[in-house]
Amino acid sequence: LVLIGLDAAGKTTTLNRLLMPYIPNEPTTPTTGFAPEKLVRGPVCMSIWDMGGQETLRRSWPFFAANTDAIMYVIDASDRPRWERSLLELSRTMDARMPSCEATVVVPGIPLLVMLNKADRCDEATLQELEALVAESVGTLSERFRCMRTAATDGVGVEDGIRWLISELNPDGHEPDV
Ligand code: G3D
Ligand code: MG
C-alpha cells in the first residue's frame, strides 16, 4: 500500500494509529524520506509506504504507486483552501503515464481509499461538500473507490478504512481478526 496526501494531511498520524492502536497520539514530524512499515491484520500482512507530502516529493508519488496493490489518500478536510490542490495531486498521480507509452504508471483498477481526515474539526455540511467534490473528481479515476471520514488523532474511521481495503484486496480471505 502507499499512503499519500499533501503535507500535514495526517498520513503519519494515520499510520501510527494503525501500527499502535492503543497508544495515544504523539506529535509527528514532517516525513521527508520513504519509510515502509509492516502492518499485520489477521492473516494479512501489508507493507505501507508513508510518502512525504511536500511539494518536491509529490512528483515521486506515481513511481512509488507503480507497483502497489492499493492507495490510501489522505485529505485534510479542515483545510478548505487546499482541497483543490489535494484533489489535483491525486488526479495527477492516478493519471501519470509511462514515458514510453500511454499506459498509466499506477496499475488500473486498484482500490483507492480516500480518507477525509481531521473530520473532528469539520461540520456535517463541510464534510458533505468535500465528499461530493471527491466523488466528482475520483469517480473517473478508479472504480474501486471509497471515501471515509477519519480523525486519525483519535483513530476514528481509520480501522474501518483498512478493513475495507483488505476486503477489496482479499475478497475470499478470512475476515481479519481485529
Ligand atoms: P503528514 O504525515 O500527512 O504530513 P501528520 O501529517 O500526521 O504529521 O499530521 C499533521 C498535523 O495534523 C499534526 O499536528 C497532527 O496531530 C494533526 N492531525 C492529524 N490527524 C488529525 C485529525 O484527525 N484531527 C486533528 N484535529 N488533527 C490531526 P501537529 O500539531 O503535531 O503538527
Ligand atoms: Mg508525515
Image (cartoon, rainbow, N blue to C red):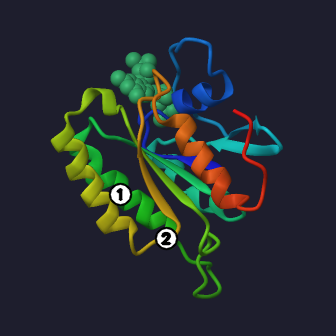
Quick one: label 1, few (<14), some, or many (20+) residues within 10 Å? some
Describe the element under mark 2 as helix, strand or loop. loop
- The image position of residue 6, as x and y in percent, is 42, 43
The image's mark for residue 161 is none
Q: Residue furthest right?
A: 43
As shown in the figure, which amino acid type bears the numbered disc 1?
Answer: Leu
| Nearer to the camera, 148 or 52 | 148
Residue 155 visible? The answer is yes
Up the image or down, 88 lies above or below 78; here it is below
Q: Quadrant of the C terminus?
A: top right
**Which element type, helix, strand or loop, lies under badge 1?**
helix
Q: Looking at the image, is mark 1 or mark 2 earlier in the sequence?
A: 1
Q: Is residue 70 left or right of residue 145?
A: right
Relative image position of residue 64 (x, y in whole percent): 66, 56
Residue 69 shows up from this direction:
no
Q: Which residue is mark 2?
A: 142
- Residue drawn at (27%, 35%), measured in percent from left and top? 78
Report x, y in % for residue 11.
Answer: 52, 36
Disc 1 designates what residue?
Answer: 87
